[in-house]
Amino acid sequence: MMDLKQIFIKNLKKFRNTKGFSQMKVAELCDTAPSYIGEIEIGRHFPSIKLIEKIGQVLEVEPYRFFIDETAETQDDMDEMINLITKLPEEQRLKIIHRISGL
């Protein structure tokens, strides 16, 4: 299991690459030193909450998402489960919802 710092680094890289931004571009848009994003991505430094918020704004990502371990397998499993549940009759879907929510 990855720790939060590793999850943050993985997600920062993923969101930055998805947006097509270089480390330098993110640093520039966050008004921080050009090498600082690289230092974060190799684990040498960790950003403040304020900088995490700025990075989130720049990458158009809610800051909490940097700390969620969204592996492809987990997302695929969830999508498959949701797809299967939506195909069930309404009565069975409601039973599953009640069981999950503890109602």
Image (tube, helix red, strand yellow):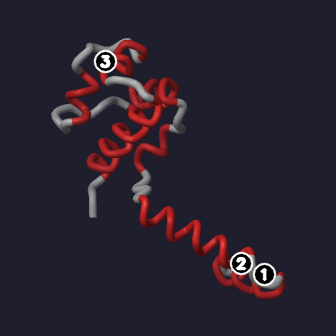
Residue designated by label 3: 24
Q: What residue do we see at 40% from left, 25% from top?
A: 21
What amino acid type should be assigned to the residue bearing mark 2?
Ile
**Mark closer to the chain start, 3 or 2:** 3
Whole-angstrom CA distance, mark 3 to mark 1, is 49 Å
**Mark closer to the chain start, 3 or 1:** 3
Q: What residue do we see at 16% from left, 34% from top?
A: 44
Q: Is 90 left, or right, of 47 in this rendering? A: right
CB under 8 Å between discs 3 and 2:
no
Position above or below: 42 against 88 = above
Residue designated by label 1: 94
Residue 97, disc: 2
Quadrant location of the N terminus? bottom left
Say which quarter of the image contains residue 69: bottom left
Whole-angstrom CA distance, mark 1 to mark 2, is 5 Å
Spot occupied by residue 65 in the image (x, y as percentages of width and height)? 48, 45
Whole-angstrom CA distance, mark 3 to mark 2, is 45 Å
What amino acid type should be assigned to the residue bearing mark 3?
Met
Position above or below: 15 against 6 = above
Position above or below: 38 against 66 = above
How would you rate the neighbour count of disc 3 (Cα within 10 Å): few for under 14, some for 14-19, many for 20 or more?
some
